Amino acid sequence: MKRLVLMGAGHAHLIVLKQWLSAPLKDVELVLVTPSAWQYYSGMLPGGVAGHYSVDQCRIDARSLALAAGARVVLGSVIEVRADKKQVRLTDGDLLDYDWLSIDIGATTNLESLRGYAGTLLSIKPLGQFHQQWSRHHERSGAKGAHIALVGGGAAGAELAMAVAHAGRAGATAPAKVSLITGNQGLLPDFRPRIRKLAHNKLAALGIEVVEQRAEAAGHDLVLTDGVTMRPDLVMAATGSEAFSFLATSGLAVDAQGFVLVNEHQQSLSHPEVFAAGDVCSRLDQSLNRSGVHAVRTAPVLAANLRAATESGEFTAFQPRTNTLYLLSCGDKTAIGSYGPFAFSGQWVWRLKDKIDRRFVGGF
Ligand SMILES: Cc1cc2nc3c(=O)[nH]c(=O)nc-3n(C[C@H](O)[C@H](O)[C@H](O)COP(=O)(O)OP(=O)(O)OC[C@H]3O[C@@H](n4cnc5c(N)ncnc54)[C@H](O)[C@@H]3O)c2cc1C
């Protein structure tokens, strides 16, 4: 029997597996390789940090879903892809042959500026590990009034800074200080000015210090662009995405940053039996944000094309939408939203986000 290996239980693969519950692939051995039985849902992570969700509410049981969809589940990570030999190597050294491979492993955090930091550093990814480390830190030192620095001025950094500030307020003692160090491009550089203004106002209202400079690690200090140093008790890194390094030596066509190049069918530009979706891939003809929303939207196309590949059918093209709804939670059960040129904020935006997120996770 021919074999399809699903590498990673990212957003797209979860939906693919869900679709195949009712209409499984014919005559194909399906294997899911995932480092954990659980997939953490990033959209609810800031709400989890703020104390609005339990850990169980923010994660999906990927292992049970895959088993129900008829897959064999291998708990481990792929550490090497040998595209020319149609093989992947797993953490335990085993080689797994495939006829088709679908990659949805997301990306890792770009820690370049924080490399060598000697203090306590929590990297936002992997999300499951971050969740555990944050919970431990919060239980241990939440009452001590620590200075927490969030490095990264994108949506994840801003949401987490607000969540951390709220978690402190809700607990026994607020953190002494929360700093958001955005990098030289400033806060939310990929968003429209109106959203940036709403976010600046909210961060100020929550007492969060916004430092629009780059931070470099030096021992236990962070050195800012202007040469001033900061010594926080805890640094959290939400410093943007970086491709997993083993992809560059996989033999697959990758872009200049090492992300897998795919066409409109989510199919590798170099190896037609390989597909990819979500943060791990890039398209030459479109510049797409790395976001969960995008990974979710590609999933039906990925499912259809994996079926087409295994059953010799026609491929479907993925057409990204022009506008996407972005919702940033602000820690205190309010949120800021944007859709195309429109920007809005308030408690109703949080309720909308909460409803969308709960429905997504509940759907599994
Ligand atoms: C705090 C935070 C909040 C966010 N909020 C939002 C939001 O509100 N809306 C939004 O659209 N986006 C949001 N994002 C971005 C979003 O998380 C990512 O774009 C999204 O998770 C990408 O999905 P994916 O399917 O590509 O991969 P992921 O969801 O990252 O899943 C990849 C999976 O592959 C596994 N894996 C990794 N390496 C391997 C390997 N070598 N072998 C096997 N498995 C592997 C991982 O463990 C993981 O389970 C947020 C990100 C963060 C950090």
Image (spheres, rainbow, N blue to C red):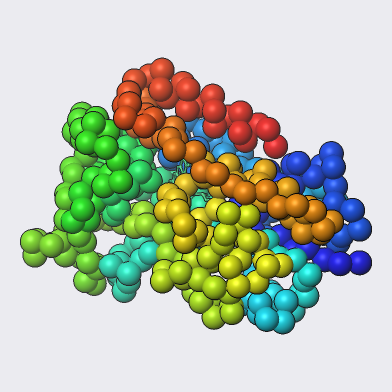
Q: Residue furthest front?
A: 314
Q: Is residue 56 left or right of residue 125?
A: right
Q: Residue at x 58, y 68 (%)?
A: 269
Vertical order, 35 against 295 (above or below): below
Q: Residue at x 61, y 52 (%)?
A: 10
Looking at the image, can residue 289 be seen?
A: yes
Q: Is residue 74 left or right of residue 298?
A: right
Image location (x, y in percent) of residue 73: 78, 59
Image location (x, y in percent) of residue 45: 48, 41
Image location (x, y in percent) of residue 60: 65, 43
The count of marks equals 0
Q: Residue at x 38, y 64 (%)?
A: 110
Looking at the image, which is closer to me, 206 or 363?
A: 363
Looking at the image, which is closer to me, 283 or 136?
A: 283
Which corner quadrant holds the C terminus? top right
Which corner quadrant holds the N terminus? bottom right
Q: Residue at x 32, y 69 (%)?
A: 112
Q: Quadrant of residue 251?
A: bottom right
